[in-house]
Every structure is written in structure tokens, then in C-alpha cells.
Image (tube, rainbow, N blue to C red):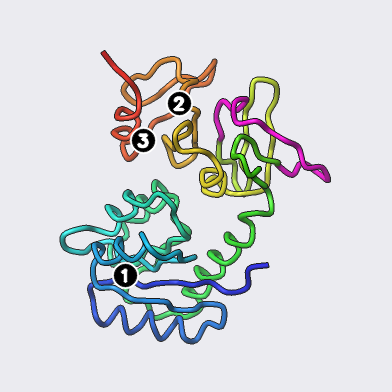
Amino acid sequence: MIDKLDCIIVDDDSMSLTILEALIEKTDFLNLKAKFVNAIDTAAFLRKHDVDLIFLDVEMPEMSGLELLSTLTKKPQIILTTSNTKYAIDAFDYDVTDYLLKPIENYARFLKAANKALDSCKNTNAGILTEAEDQSFYVKVDSLLVKIDFTEILWIEAFGDYVKIFTDQKMFLVYTTLRTVEDKLPSTVFMRVHRSYIIRIDKIENIDQGNLQVKNKIIPVSNTYKPKLMDRIQTL
């Protein structure tokens, strides 16, 4: 059972760094591993070290926090820190755990975000178990663990605190997060195309300006993910 989160702070503002460090020190289940003033050094660190949670400033020189997120192949829990409310929408697009508005002065609000990250980590393996061969996983349905082969999956859809996994035969409703499912799936075959959807690439039947079709389902494609999608498919 996860009861402590290793975390890092990424913020180019010295005052924000100091405040976050003090708040983390007050929180018994957070363990600060490192702090950085830019995203480039952070990316180098994350290539060699695993962490559970990043407190990530959005607006930084050279590489923004959101640009850093787009480079990560393995995403920990992310709490964005920003002084601009417009980034709340980006927080949903990037499927971050939460966001905190600067100046971060309310410990109760900080603790709520940190607890959300802890709960997400605890639930990571509660709903889905992956086989060693990475060709299938087991999902918990009522009191049963049901095996789903990756070849059977058409798309996965966020549904509140659950996800819906659609296969050729049926739909499975699983208590977990879309990010947890995304981490379990092979990225060579599946990809996120929207904050609420993951699709199997070879099941796409057509793509238009803002949507794609899998079977009879029209799935939205957000501007955040469309360039990556177009890079992944072959066109003439």
C-alpha cells in the first residue's frame, strides 16, 4: 500500500519554491526529492529517476511546464502551479491531478491537492492488473477479475471516477482513472486523443478536422493531441 509520495518542485520563482518546500515539509506523506528552477534540468533528472508527484510551474523560460509534460513518456501525478486561471483548462487537457493558484497561501487547499495525488497513486493498481507479457490486463468487475486482451480493445472513455473499456463484444466499467489505463497500455498501439479518450490506432476508420471514427463511435480529437496523432498514422 502506498503511504508516501516522492515528489519534486519545478518553479523558476524563488518565493514559490520556498513556499512549496515549507508546505511539503508540513505534509507527512510527501517526501521532497529535489527542486528545480527550469524544465530542462527537470527532464534530465526524470530520465534517470522515478517520482510519484511533480509540483510544476506552468510559465517558465526556454521550456514551459506544459511543454515538459508533453515530453514525458511515463507521467507521475502532476499538480500545476500557476498565477493564471486560464491554465485550468490546460490542466484538464493534460490530465493533471490538480492545479494550485499562486500565491499558494492556503494549506488546506494544498493538502486537498496532495491528498488527491495520494489517492490516485493508491488506486493505480486497484482497478487494473497487467500481465507480465503486456498483451492483456485484468480488470476488476464486481468481485471478479476479468481478463481483457489488448487486441480486443477499441477505445477507452473517461466516465467520472470510472473508465469505460469498449471491446468488440462488450463494455467494461472499471473504477480507475484514464491515466492509469494509459500507463498500462503499449504506447505503440494505443494513444490518448482527448482528455477523455484513448483509442487503438489501428481501429481508426477515418479522421476529419476535429474527430475520428472507431466502428460507429465518433470520438473527439483535441488540438493538444492531434499533431501527435497525425505523426503516428501513415498518409499519402
User: Between marks 2 and 3, how big is the CA–CA gap?
Assistant: 15 Å
User: Between marks 2 and 1, how big is the CA–CA gap?
Assistant: 33 Å
The disc label shown at residue 195, or none: none
Q: Is residue 219 above or below residue 61?
A: above
**Residue labelled with disc 1:** 10
Secondary structure at badge 2 equals helix
Dot 2 or dot 3, earlier in sequence: 2
**Residue labelled with disc 2:** 201
Mark in front: 3 vs 1? 1
Q: Residue placed farthest to the front in the image?
A: 133
The disc label shown at residue 222, or none: 3
Residue placed most toward the observer, 26 or 150:
150
Q: Residue at x 35, y 67 (%)?
A: 81
User: Between marks 3 and 1, how big is the CA–CA gap?
Assistant: 26 Å
Q: Quadrant of the N terminus?
A: bottom right
Q: Amino acid at mark 3?
A: Ser
Mark in front: 2 vs 3? 2
Q: Residue at x 45, y 42 (%)?
A: 195
Q: Amino acid at mark 2?
A: Ile
Q: Residue at x 45, y 15 (%)?
A: 205
Secondary structure at badge 3 equals loop
Give the class, few, some or many, for how many residues have Cα within 10 Å of label 2's Cα (few <14, many ≥20): many
Dot 3 or dot 1, earlier in sequence: 1
Q: Amino acid at mark 1?
A: Val
Magenta residues, start to end:
139-156
